[in-house]
Image (cartoon, grey):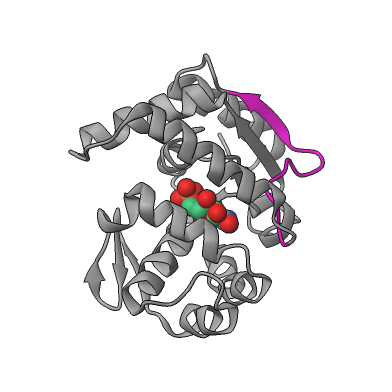
């Protein structure tokens, strides 16, 4: 049995950062499932595919070549790490992600990431759909304002020109779409450890999940 920790939650809760830090601390693999949906959103945009063209998007999900090299994300051999982090691509990702056929095509790629010595997987449906037998499921939340603020700082740092009120609106719209879709909606899976990160620092969240991982996998986490 490969130890798996799933970290789900809406955007801007720090899932990706927490998952990355925890994976490093444990020496485990990490899966940024959102990057897969973002790459698909970008590939669809570039091909001019409409967000409701479910079958064409599913075909693209099967054929596109996605690679992860350290922190870098590759689409058909091209480095797209920065290109997939814009809000526009985040929005495109959440539109392609509503289709059940598309999600199905991405399942195998995600499950392949479960390799020894362990996996930290972050996204929206890691604990509910992709790894339902994970030994530890975590669900992170934070207020929409706080999440927009965090995203604002992140994007500014990367040199993007962004407006805070616009980010709050975009985050709310994306949450609404993610929560209300019929396939794999964003929700806390049963038995998950729920952590409201609104007034917590990243190291505090990492410690909280680390403690829970120690309890869940006493032999693997020391
Ligand atoms: O996590 P991130 O913001 O990068 O994800 C972008 C979008 O991809 C999300 O808004 C969501 O619609 C979709 N997604 C998903 N399932 C996942 C991860 C991401 O539907 N497991």
Instruction: Identify the main secondary structure in magenta.
Output: loop
* Residue beneath the point at 55% across and 37% down: 172
Between residue 149 and residue 208, name the one nearer to us.
Answer: 149
Q: From the image, which quarter does the N terminus lie in?
A: bottom right
Rendered residue at 62%/63% (across/down): 98
Along the line of sight, which residue is nearer the eye, 206 or 46?
A: 46
Is residue 121 something that shows in the picture?
Answer: no
Q: x, y (%) of residue 46? A: 31, 73
In the picture shown, does residue 194 fall above or below 114?
A: above
- Specify whether residue 187 is painted magenta: yes
Tell me: 221 left or right of 26: right
Examine the structure image and report whether residue 84 is included in the region drawn in magenta: no
Coordinates of residue 119 in the picture (x, y in percent): 54, 53
- The magenta-colored residue range is 183-196
Query: Hey, which quadrant is residue 112 in on the image?
Result: bottom right
Residue furthest to the left in view is: 159
Classify the position of the C terminus by image quarter: top right
In this view of the protein, can residue 123 be seen by the observer? yes
Q: Is residue 4 above or below residue 40?
A: above
Q: Position of residue 63 (x, y in %)?
A: 44, 85
Q: Position of residue 95 (x, y in %)?
A: 53, 61
Where is 92 relative to 212, above or below?
below
Q: Nearer the viewer, residue 82 or 203?
A: 82
Q: Nearer the viewer, residue 35 or 163?
A: 163
Considering every residue shown, the one lying at the far right of the view is 190
Is residue 53 rendered to the left or right of residue 46?
right
């Amino acid at each position: 049995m490969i130890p798996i920790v799933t970290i789900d939650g809406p955007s801007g809760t720090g899932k990706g950062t927490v998952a990355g830090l925890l994976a490093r601390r444990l020496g485990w693999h990490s899966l940024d499932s959102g990057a897969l949906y973002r790459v698909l959103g970008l590939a669809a945009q570039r091909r001019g595919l409409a967000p409701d063209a479910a079958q064409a998007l599913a075909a693209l999900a099967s054929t596109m070549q996605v690679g992860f090299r350290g922190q870098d994300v590759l689409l058909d051999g091209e480095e797209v790490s920065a290109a997939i982090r814009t809000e526009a691509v985040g929005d495109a990702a959440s539109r392609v992600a509503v289709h059940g056929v598309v999600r199905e095509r991405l399942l195998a790629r995600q499950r392949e990431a479960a390799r020894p010595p362990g996996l930290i997987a972050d996204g929206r449906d890691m604990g509910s759909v992709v790894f339902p037998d994970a030994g530890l499921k975590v669900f992170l939340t934070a207020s929409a304002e706080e999440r927009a603020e965090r995203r604002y700082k992140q994007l500014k740092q990367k040199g993007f020109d962004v407006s805070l009120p616009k980010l709050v609106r975009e985050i709310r719209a994306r949450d609404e779409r993610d929560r209300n879709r019929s396939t794999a909606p964003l929700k806390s899976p049963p038995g998950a450890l729920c952590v409201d990160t609104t007034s917590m620092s990243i190291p505090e969240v990492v410690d909280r999940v680390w403690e829970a991982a120690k309890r869940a996998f006493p032999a693997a986490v020391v």
